[in-house]
Image (cartoon, coloured by chain):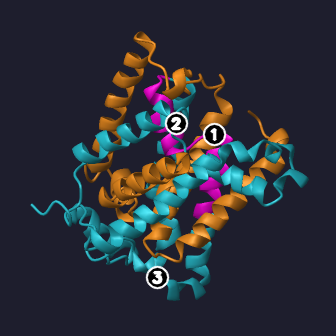
Amino acid sequence: MNLIYDPWPWYVAGPLIALTMFVLLYIGKQFGMSSNLRTMCSIGGGAKYADFFKFDWKSQRWNLVVVAGAVIGGFIASEFMSNNTVKINPDVAQQLSTDYGIESAGEAYLPPELFATENLSDPFVLAVLILGGFMVGFGARYAGGCTSGHAISGLSNLQLPSLIAVIGFFIGGLVMIHLLFPLIFS
Amino acid sequence: MKYLSYLTIGIFFGIIMYKSEAASWFRIYEMFQFGSFHMYGIIGSALVLGVIGVQVIKKYNIKAIGGKEMNLHPKRKGVTNYLIGGIIFGLGWALAGACPGPMYVLAGAGYLSILIVIASAILGTFVYGVLKDKLPH
């Protein structure tokens, strides 16, 4: 097994994510990624439009530095530690290809059908990216957190609101994949 | 010096997200198709260790660096905003195949189109902030 190039199995990644959370707790912070989106709105002058963005965003600068690190981490991993392909369950890959014409499973990290730069001129692709991003940002703030803040930090602290949010994440995800994908992509 | 540690944590986190393929649209799709244990294993094992660790912290009253309390505040009680917000988030997560951590990781990996997703997520956050008082919580 090639430790550098092969994908990391779940039993390596999961514990390392828990470690990330505990290191942040130990240095007096908490693990939560979507709050950075609110910070960016405040930096961009959001306080003029809503009180929600009137807060001491400077106290959140540390988390923006974590974001900068994540960007660098993505660069390092994709450039030096990966062949940038993702092998998924062959049945799922086959289904993606037959039903939706997404044929890049096993050959790419993200489907070029949706993420290739030249496809940005396709209004359908652009709409998928904008709508997806919008719902992630809106939903994360409405729910008070995302996968890191609720599914990892909140559930680790046995918070019932986080469990409700995570159940919501899965309801939304299952509805999108099983009910809406057939309408959107075929 | 402090900022260097935040940056290091971010780099570490970014590499984990990319190398575990949790940042891949394909893995998110496969998860919601129940096609593999992979994503459930990642979240589940992080969670089991997280729950145990937080219980240990509370039982032995372990402090953060400098003797401060750890940031383990209870979440505000409620159902509506967590459920509706969660569902909207899930719809977007499955469609874009990326949540707020991996988005930045993918930007670093050179996928320019993810910048559209990030900008839209910022816009979504902004619209939430504007509408907040009119929404049921």
In the rendered structure, which amino acid carries the disc numbered 2?
His
Q: Earlier in the sequence, mark 2 or mark 3?
A: 3
Give left or right: position of A51 versus A35: right
Residue linked to disc 2:
A150
Disc number placed over residue A116 in the picture, else none: 3
**For marks 3 and 1 on the same chain, the one whose residue lies earlier in the sequence:** 3
Residue pictured at 79% horizontal, 40% vertical? B135
Mark 1 element type: helix
Task: Choose between A138 and B2: the one closer to the eye.
Answer: B2
Q: Is A181 located above or below residue B84 in the figure?
A: below
Question: Dot 3: within a 10 Å radius of its alpha carbon, few (fewer than 14), some, or many (20 or more) residues?
Answer: some
- Camera-near label (1 vs 2) is 2
Describe the element under mark 3 as helix, strand or loop. Answer: loop
Asked if the residue under mark 3 is in contact with the one under mark 2, i.e. CB atoms within 8 Å, the reply is no
Q: Which residue is drawn at 58% across and 71% down?
A: B115
Element carrying mark 2: helix
Q: How crowded is mark 1: few (under 14 residues within 10 Å), some or many (20 or more)?
A: many
Q: Is residue B107 placed above or below A164 in the rendered structure? A: below
Give how far across and how far down residue A83 sits, in percent. Answer: 25, 74
Which residue shows up at 36% across the image and 38% down it?
A: A19
Colour that chain A carries in the picture: cyan
Q: Contact, CB < 8 Å: mark 1 with mark 2? A: yes
- For the residues labelled 3 and 1, the Cα–Cα distance comes to 31 Å
